[in-house]
Amino acid sequence: METFIKTNETHLISDLCVETVDTDKNVENVNDKSRKYYACDICGQKFCQERLLKKHFHTHTKEKPYSCVVCNKDFSRKSDLTRHCRTHTNEKPFSCDVCGKSYSTKDSLRKHFHTHTKEKPYSCNVCGKEFSQRNSLNRHYQTHTNEKPYSCDVCHKKFSWKNNLIVHARTHTNEKPYSCDVCGKGFSLRCILDKHYRIHTKEKPYSCDACGKTFSQSFTLFTHCRIHTNEKPFSCHVCYKDFSQKSSFNWHLRTHTNEKPYSCDVCNKAFSQKSKLKVHYRTHTNEKPFSCDVCGKSYSYKDSLKKHFLTHTNKYSCEVCGKNYSHKASFKKHNRIHTVNESYSSDCA
């Protein structure tokens, strides 16, 4: 049917029911008061061109005519496909004028800019807490409503946000869509990949105001600061011992429960900590990641390297005869020679 642009009239445009909206009726963010706009009859969103409304309508019909040639993922809008393609090319065309950091989407750059301005335009109408991003405010609202509409089909765990459910599902599928282009290691989350990159770049952008120590992750700095404040927010309900880090607290609890959730798939030996299992694996792989800067000798354990390094420094020296020792145990054993001799001399006298 032929389309006429008239105020307050509804017409068919390619099987879409479209309402043309008069701009005099409080249309938001419109400068040209004489212009006519198309409004979606489903959600009310307004568009200045018919083609934009048609593209928008795909979001309601679930039609996805645009497909990625790399991974075949489908999209309802061409702009969404363009943004997605950057996950494959790692293209980041939007850069911050302040710090130079680059982003793949304009929206990500806009959100990042709030870190410089400290602007927090979104506030919670329940508790008044302010946020720099709208999605952070929306997530915060869940703390008041405790609403969790998304459920895992495998374990039935519930989530407040669909994205959290998608990420959780990877614990069942072991999907790791993000990989490091340096070492090839895969990750389930992009943010974890970004943090991992700092292992290669040695970047440590977070520094402690008290002692100047630098860290690669903000959370590590946050927990480190408790060393200075002596804050220990995690308390054991069995022995009432306090801990500054939740991980240390969880490890400690296993001393009461004797829980050992991490087991070796080679010999089935069980461990209470994942780090201990990782170290144990080296007995099977003969991996020796710690090497001496002086002689190049390699070790499976960091503690073994530390002990070895003393052979180059001769840290312990006998005040009686001047003999040097690299290990404290050997030094103590040697001291007994002088102690016995002194005791023998006094007995003879």
Image: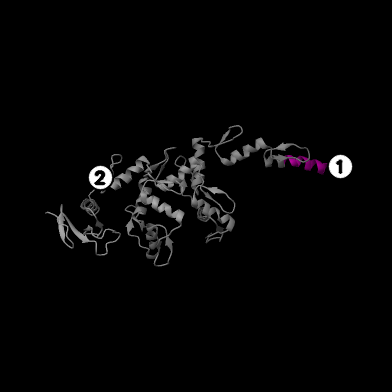
First-in-chain label (1 vs 2)? 2
Query: Which mark, by number, is residue 69?
Result: none
Residue 235 seen in the current view: no
Quadrant (top left, top right, bottom left, bottom right) of the C terminus: top right
**Amino acid at circle 2:** Tyr
Closer to the eye: label 1 or 2: 2
Task: Verify whether residue 343 appears in magenta.
Answer: yes
> In the orientation shown, which residue stands out farthest toward the left?
1
In the displayed structure image, the side of residue 130 where residue 311 appears, left or right: right
Quickly name the residue at label 1: 348
Q: Residue 315: where, in percent of width, then height?
A: 69, 40
**Nearer to the camera, 280 or 222:** 222
**Nearer to the camera, 193 or 133:** 133
Q: Residues within 10 Å of mark 2 (few under 14, many from 20)?
A: some
What secondary structure characterizes most of the magenta part?
Answer: helix
Quickly name the residue at label 2: 66
Position of residue 283 relative to residue 110, above or below, is above
Count of numbered tags: 2
Q: Secondary structure at mark 2?
A: strand
**Amino acid at circle 1:** Cys
In the displayed structure image, the side of residue 216 where residue 22 appears, left or right: left
Q: Secondary structure at mark 1?
A: helix
Q: Residue 153: where, in percent of width, then height?
A: 31, 53
